[in-house]
């Protein structure tokens, strides 16, 4: 079978890495990371050959609330002084339909690594941008438990429940620029 795989890099100016987590058992708090990079190898004919490597600068966390961001950078959560980045390195991929791939990879946060499944959807066809670059786009989601990564701080609420939920939903919007 012909190999049509192409290497793409994440365009951070046109992409977003966000997350949400339950707060006070009543709502989800959302945040983003401002600094990230990564490469993706993708072949529309053989999506099972998809490979992803990404790095996120956790100090770039932004929840639109300075004190919360400071807490997240501290040793109870991301501990950026000792673990300045989180990484995702794919291990396998499986086509789950048109323009859809599930990518299993090693997610490392705070020096702890667990496999997570990144559900990549709405993968676009290659298109040419205004400057002649070749691009694709996609959305992706995953969930993980923060306690699996040694982020266990919490406080019980008088009415029951806890301040911070354990399950974190990750949401990505990616614009990818072809490099080969």
Image: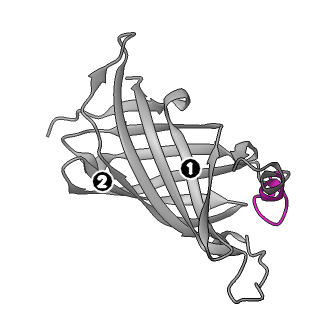
In the image, is residue 114 above or below residue 173?
A: below
Give the residue pinned by disc 2: 101
Q: Which element is circle 2 on?
A: strand
Q: Which element is circle 1 on?
A: strand
Looking at the rendered image, the quarter that the N terminus falls into is top left
Q: Please indicate whether residue 12 sits to the left or right of residue 152 in the image.
A: left
Q: Between marks 1 and 2, how big is the CA–CA gap? A: 20 Å
Image coloring type = one colour
Q: Please indicate whether residue 106 sits to the left or right of residue 91 in the image.
A: right
The image position of residue 162, as x and y in percent, is: 71, 81
Most foreground residue, 66 or 95: 66
Would you say residue 48 sits in the magenta stretch? no
Extreme-left residue of the structure: 1
Q: Magenta stretch?
A: 70-80
The image position of residue 149, as x and y in percent, is: 67, 69
Q: Earlier in the sequence, mark 1 or mark 2?
A: 1
- Residue 18's tag is 1
The image position of residue 5, as x and y in percent, is: 29, 35
Q: Main secondary structure of the magenta part?
A: loop
In the image, is residue 40 above or below residue 162?
A: above
The image position of residue 51, as x and y in percent, is: 40, 46
In the image, is residue 139 above or below residue 147?
A: above
């Amino acid at each position: 079978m012909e190999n049509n795989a192409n290497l793409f890099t994440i365009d951070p100016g046109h992409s977003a890495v966000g997350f949400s987590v339950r707060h006070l058992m009543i709502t989800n708090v959302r945040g983003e990371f401002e600094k990230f990079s990564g490469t993706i190898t993708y072949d529309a004919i053989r999506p099972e050959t998809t490979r992803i490597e990404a790095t996120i600068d956790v100090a770039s966390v932004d929840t639109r609330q300075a004190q919360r961001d400071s807490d997240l950078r501290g040793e109870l959560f991301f501990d950026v002084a000792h673990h300045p980045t989180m990484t995702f390195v794919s291990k396998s991929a499986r086509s789950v339909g048109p323009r859809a791939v599930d990518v299993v990879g090693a997610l490392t946060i705070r020096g702890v690594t667990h496999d997570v499944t990144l559900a990549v959807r709405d993968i676009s066809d290659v298109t040419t941008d205004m400057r002649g670059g070749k691009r694709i786009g996609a959305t992706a989601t995953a969930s993980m438990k923060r306690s699996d990564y040694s982020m266990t701080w919490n406080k019980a609420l008088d009415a029951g429940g806890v301040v911070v939920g354990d399950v974190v939903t990750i949401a990505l919007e990616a614009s990818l620029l072809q490099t080969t």
